[in-house]
Amino acid sequence: MKFKRFIVLLVLFLHTSIIGRAQTIYWSMVPSKYVDIQQIGQQMFQVAGPDGHLGVIKPDGTVFLDTVCDEITPFFHQWALLIKHDGKRRKVIGCLCADGTYHLFKDTFYTLKGIEFYSEGLLAVENCNKEKVYIDFNGLECIGSGKEYSRIMPFSEGLAVVFEKKGTSYLIDKNGKSVPIIVTDVNGITLTHAFNAYHGVALVWDDNGNYFYYNVKDKTVSRTNKPADNITYDYLFRYSAEGKTPQYDESFTVREDGNVELIVQDGKYGYAATSDKKILLPCQLADATPFVDGYAIVKMTDKKCGILKCDNSDVDTFEIYPIEKDVRFSPDETVLCKFKASVPKSLVGQNVTIAVKGINNVISKGEGYYAFSYRPKSTNQAFEVSILSEGLELFTANVVYNFKKIAGKATTSSGIQKPSEESSNKQQQTDKKKPNGTKKQDKKKEQKKEKKSDKKRPDII
């Protein structure tokens, strides 16, 4: 915010009067070192540190995975790859499951273009010896080590196509063994090409243009006509029209909160209730997303990012009001202005602060009661009081006091009446007219009176 605030750290106690069901927005994760946050799964957020490296956290900031990678691929069959850039190559340093578990690999592997995902529990990669191999979720080589495959494809329905250096291709199973496909109706056929299985059958053919369908389940072969000239294969190297873009998981169902809407004022973002447009969070954010599954990602003006939570179950709201609206004062006297500030139940135990614009001596009186000293300058004065949490302005309201000047003589801080300016002047003129001897006698009488008065007073501790 633009104006200067002086803040006293205080933990608020709750005012528990029931006002009606309300929505409360507060920090789920306070902004810290992260410069970017994206939701990638249920209760799972990808974060970027100042150096650009990525990690994964829970909504409350609990770390799933430290910021150790340069890229996290989309989830495919519940798994994503953790990537480090190595020049122009992309090194696979581990994998992440949609439930938050992950594995970091000991050995060095690189992705193969177009098939950067696990399929049926195996990932096609290139190892440090430039061999095309399949690895499991722990980064252990399962198939291909010592082989001389020129290309390998993802697994589909328990089988995968591999290519030899001479250009021929064939199907292997998950044990790495080639699948024998025998054509019984024609002699002398040697199958040299294959696609992965799609809906239970795999298209295979020879160099002479003889095409067959291999039934994966019963292992039978049936002849088919040559497919159209524009033979296409999909992202799993199957003969199909599903396209070459992997069908990544919808790792979480996006459920936008229809009860809260984004608002903008002077280029800053905040939130309001959709129904009655009541301000739920004043506009103060440099950037913000809508609430999804109860959470929103926001960026502060210092470019740090955090996660907000919206609680729709609160039965009480923020309240700020004066304890004594009418305050009596004497000239040049400092008075004590008292007010009450209460917060919803969802903020119990959180680090909440009170700020009064232009005031630096706010003190807590306990159980949500506060006070500050002020020297009245006018009869009516409004003070802007804010409830904040870790730099986030949660609620702001004006507290108005009616200052009423006390008629008659002012009092000193000890409670002794001070003579008015007029009576003081008259006394000085009378003293001047008195002879010196009389003045000395009056002075002695006054000193005796003061001594008697001091004996009657109790000790002040």
Image (cartoon, helix red, strand yellow):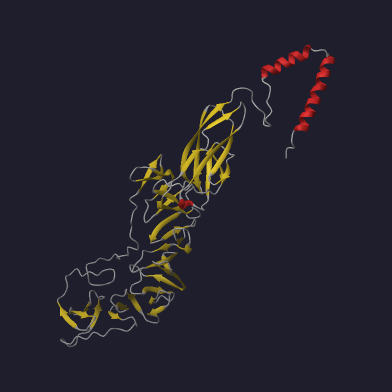
Quarter-wise, where is residue 240 in the image?
Answer: bottom left
Task: Count the numbered circles shown.
Answer: 0
Q: Nearer the viewer, residue 346 or 83?
A: 346
In the rendered image, the vertical position of residue 445 relative to residue 99, given as above or below: above
Residue 206 makes an appearance in the image: no
Q: Residue at x 78, y 13 (%)?
A: 432
Q: Tell me if 241 is positioned left or right of 396 in this view.
A: left
Left or right, residue 155 beside residue 68 = left
**Farthest-out residue, front:** 456
- Residue nearer the viewer, 342 or 145: 342
- Percent x, y for residue 255? 33, 56
Percent position (x, y) of residue 95?
A: 41, 69
The residue most toward the top is 433
Q: Tell whether 292 sits left or right of 437.
A: left
Residue 132 figure quarter: bottom left
Question: Depth check: 214 or 420 in front?
Answer: 420
Q: Kindly give the residue lying farthest to the right in the view shown.
A: 437
Residue drawn at (35%, 61%) of the image: 252
Tell me if residue 450 comes above or below residue 202 in the rendering. above
Instruction: Say whether residue 281 is visible.
Output: yes
56 vs 1: above or below: below
For image coordinates 69% across by 32% down, the residue present is 414
- Looking at the picture, does residue 305 appear above or below residue 98? above
Tell me where residue 108 appears, x and y as whole percent: 45, 72
Q: Position of residue 398 (x, y in %)?
A: 47, 36
Quadrant assignment for the C terminus = top right
